[in-house]
Amino acid sequence: MQARTDHSTVIEVRQLWKVIENPPSRVEILRDVSFSVPRGQFLAIMGASGSGKSTLLGLLAGLDTVTSGTISVDGVDITNLREDALARVRGRKIGFVFQSYQLVPTLTAEENILLPAELSGLNGNPRRRAAELLDRVGLTQRAHHYPVQLSGGEQQRIALARAFITRPPILMADEPTGNLDSANGQHVLDLLVQLNREEKTTLILVTHDRNLAEYADRIVTLRDGRVLTDELAPRPVETRPLEA
């Protein structure tokens, strides 16, 4: 798989620390982390449980605050932004896919997909966009079903469609296949990568699975809160054609 970059930087992380102070204890979750992500790159962040990878993703998405250091997202320094300004950055620039789906149980599949568009005041025709995404993830017939009526794999596919509804320049995914069996996990991964290629977004994926990480252009590995390695993926991995 070829890296899809235009050589401009979309994520810039400099000397990032995340520390939890609870005297007399001090827990250093992230320690002096620095890296940048070119626009259009598929970056996998790897590490064992407790390495700090999910905390790092939350910081990149503006879902948590740093102890020290700086983070720039698509040209905006988010390090000291107020929550209302952070919410605007997230709404305009970032799509997020959670391991646990995070669908609203009282909304249908279509309504869940439309939610970010409604919150951000997306122009155009969001319902047409939602219909296109439902078709793309093979769930048009599930548009009016509630999350409880969907399988885990179907819920994650709806979550992917929701993340893409606003065409964000950056997509972040935290262990998106972690709650799925191998067949559904592979289907979701193939779908995630192919949607990313079509939408031309920058993709940042957190995983502990080396095989999954090798779908990426580049792999950053954390250990004990520090960057252990930063390398190009060792071999290109192609996704399989999708079936609805």
Image: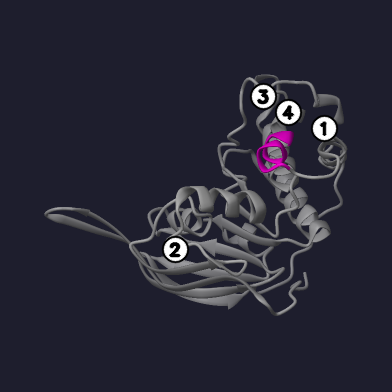
Kindly report which numbered mark, 3 or 2, lies closer to the viewer in this rendering.
2
Q: Which residue is mark 2?
A: 79
Kindly report which numbered mark, 4 or 1, lies closer to the viewer in this rendering.
4
Residue 103, x across and y down, in percent: 62, 31
Kindly report which numbered mark, 2 or 4, lies closer to the viewer in this rendering.
2
Counting residues from the N terminus, which is met first, the one under dot 4 or under dot 3? 4
Q: Which residue is mark 4?
A: 111
User: Magenta segment, which residues?
Assistant: 114-121
Q: Which residue is mark 3?
A: 147
What's the CA distance linking mark 2 and mark 4? 32 Å
Q: Is residue 134 left or right of residue 223?
A: right
Counting residues from the N terminus, which is met first, the one under dot 3 or under dot 1? 1
Quadrant holding the N terminus: bottom right
**Residue 70 figure quarter:** bottom left
**Residue type (three-letter) at the residue carrying disc 1:** Leu
Residue 193, x across and y down, in percent: 75, 56
Question: In this view, which residue lies farthest toward the left?
Answer: 24
What's the CA distance linking mark 3 and mark 1? 12 Å
